[in-house]
Amino acid sequence: MPITQLDGHQVHVDAEGFLTEYGEWDEELAKVLAAQIGIDLTEEHWKVIRFLREDFKDKGETATARRVQTVGGVPVREQFALFPKKPGKKMAYIAGLPKPHGCV
Amino acid sequence: MTTTETRPAIVPSFDDDESTGRKLAIICSKGNLDMAYPGLILANAALGEGVETHLFFTFWGFDMITLSRMNHLQFSPAGNAAMHLPGSDAHFPQALAPLPGVTPAATHMLKKQIADLGVPEVPEFLDQIVAAGGHLWACRMSADMNKLTLDDLRGDVEGIISAADFIEKTEGAQLLFI
C-alpha cells in the first residue's frame, strides 16, 4: 500500500487514492480530500460524510447511495447534487472509506 | 514488515470530463419480476458512474411502468430449468411449476430475497433511477396494443415514443436488450 502526503497528513491509500486506514481520517483531512476533487464541503455534505463514517464503523462496509437514502436520510437526488455524477465513489473518497461494493 | 514508499498525493480520476460522452440505452421487454431487475440494476449502476442512461419499456416490460400493473409483477418457475428448491442444488420439478399457488409462493420468496439485500421493489427502484437522472420512455406500439396512454403510466415517463424515436434519442449509446 502506498503512503501519500496530503496537506501534511501521511496516509495509506490504495492504487486509486482511496484511504485504506479508517483511523487515519479526520474532518480536517476530509476538507483536503474534497478540495482535491473540486468539492467545497457544506453542512449538507457533512451530513452524508458523518453518516458514512458511523455506518462503516457499525457495518464494516461503505454504504451505497441506496443506503445513504434509506438509512442516512439523504435522498439520491440530493446526493447527485452534492457529489455530482459519481456520488457513491466521491462520498466514499471524502469520507476516507473504500468504494462501496454493493450493487444497489 | 512491508516496505512502503511515500508518494505525492494520489487523487482518484473520477473522469468527470471523459464520462460525459458515454450513454447507455436499455430496452426492457420482460414483465416477469426476475427479468425486471437486471435492467434496473444496470441502469442504477451506470447512473452512479455518471453515464447518461435511457430505459425503453416495450412489450411485457411495459408492465413495469403501468400504474395498475407495476406493483403486481410475478415470478414463475415454469419454463425456468435453472430454478432450484430453496436452499438446495436440486432442481424444482418442472411438473409442479404450473400448479396453483406456485407462482404466488415463488413471487413471495423472490421478493423477500431481494428485500433482504436492501434492494427496492420495482416502482421504488424506478423512483431512484429517475432521481439519479435516468430517463424513462414508453413504447408506442405497446401502448397502442394495450390501449394505454400517458395517464396510465408513471408520471415520470417522459413520453410514448416510436422505436425510431428511441433509436434517434440514443445515438451513440451502448445498448442492452433485456
Image: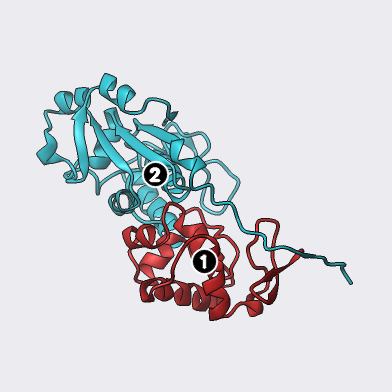
Relative image position of residue B105 (x, y in whole percent) = 36, 50
Residue plotted at (17% across, 45% down) = B67
Instruction: Reply above or below: B134 against B80.
Output: below
Q: Which amino acid does the dot numbered 1 rest on? A: Ala
User: Mark 1, residues whose alpha carbon is within 10 Å: few (<14), some, or many (≥20)?
Assistant: few
Chain letter, colour red: A
Residue position for label 2: B40
Residue B89 visible somewhere in the drawing: yes
Quadrant of the image occupied by residue B60: top left
Residue position for label 1: A35
**Circle 2 — which element?**
helix
Instruction: Reply above or below: B156 against B117.
Output: above
Instruction: Reply above or below: B172 against B50.
Output: above
Q: Which amino acid does the dot numbered 2 rest on? A: Leu
Q: Quadrant of the N terminus of chain A?
A: bottom right
Chain letter, colour cyan: B
| Chain on which label 1 sits | A
Residue plotted at (68% across, 63% down) = B9
**Of residues B51 and B125, the one drawn nearer to the viewer in this rendering:** B51
